[in-house]
Amino acid sequence: MTLQLPERPPIVARFDLSAGVASPTVTLTLPAPAIDTPPSPPPLAIPIALTLTITPQRALARGVELQWQSLQAASPGPQTRSPASAPTTSERPTPTSPGPTPAAEYEAIVVPRNTRGPITLRVPAGAYALRARAPGFVPQAITVPLDAPRQIDLHLRRDATEPARLGLGFGLGGAGLVLGAVGVGFVARGSGALADLRRDGALPDCGTPERCRAAANGALDVSSGLALLGSGVGAGIVAATVGARARDRALKIEAGAGAAMFVGGLIWYVAEIQGPYTLQHRARDHIAATVLGGGAGLLGAATISLVTRRLLRRRQPAHALAPALSPNSVGLTWNARF
């Protein structure tokens, strides 16, 4: 007798009726089906409210970026397996050494600039590293253990280098304006002198030594004025870079470009004034003087900015206080370099 069931191997039973038994009984036993118990789902993370009050309002007006990172490494949920579905000897995994658990990445939001009240974050329970920063303010970092709704005050302190940055930017910008104004005056005076000589027929051939000397002085005034104007433009470019809170790399690039322009313009200008030329060829002198002045302005202003930043970094304190919060206490943490 053969018993065939879907998705099961056939069961064959053989028996003999020659003994004369009128009512034979045949019992067929099916193997118990394997039960695969699915893994239990991880517990649901219930978000907890973390309310932050950020001051001063000036920091919010400039835009505050909040970052938080969970300090608890995520572990996989428990998994169960029935004995019937346990792996065989050939299926057992080879034990390997556990690798380092990757740290959780920072999550970040930018607080809207028109925010007036507290900010509420809803995160799962645990310990978090919280950071807040805004342009012109010292970044604040605290560790917050969160097991119940909590309210925290974050006060951002004004960066000590901010007044120096503003003063440096305004100073370089003002110096650029002064240099540009003086340069425009020199250019106007030299151009007026050359125009008078041109009307009198003294250009391009001046004729007398007095007229040649006057034409040379006028051309020199134009070259000097263009050099001053270029210096003012270079100082203004560096002032804009400082005002935009650019990194030192941008200032170093400007200093390098200024040095190249200064050296190239100086060599060009010296070659032009020492070579044989006439007054009508002074346009090349003017271009060389402009390049020379622009390089000097870039190089000088960028060097002053880099030196000022370096001096300000040396004046920053080597220690800082930060709040330390725990479920049952509030304190301060002193971080210092010895």
Image: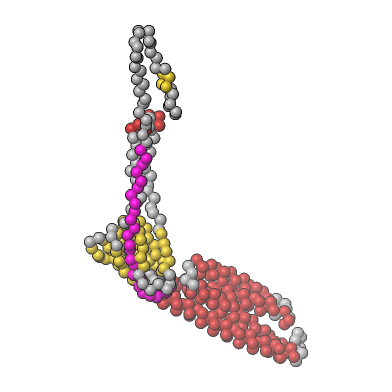
Q: How many labels does the image show?
A: 0
Choose between 70 and 234: the one closer to the eye.
Answer: 70
Q: Which residue is drawn at 61% across and 85% down?
A: 184
**Image spot of residue 102 (x, y percent):** 39, 50
Position of residue 288 relative to residue 69, above or below, is below
| 55 in relation to 196, above or below | above
Residue drawn at (62%, 75%) of the image: 291
In-image side of 202 versus 129 (left or right): right
Q: Where is residue 74 in the image (x, y as percent from the top left)?
A: 35, 50
124 lies left or right of 289: left
In the rendered image, residue 56, in percent from the top left (x then y), is placed at: 36, 74
Region rendered in magenta: 37-63
Task: Identify the image quadrant of residue 289.
Answer: bottom right
Image quadrant where one finds the C terminus = bottom left
Residue 281: image location, x then y, percent: 72, 79
Residue 47 is covered by the magenta coloring: yes
Q: Which colour scheme is used?
A: secondary structure
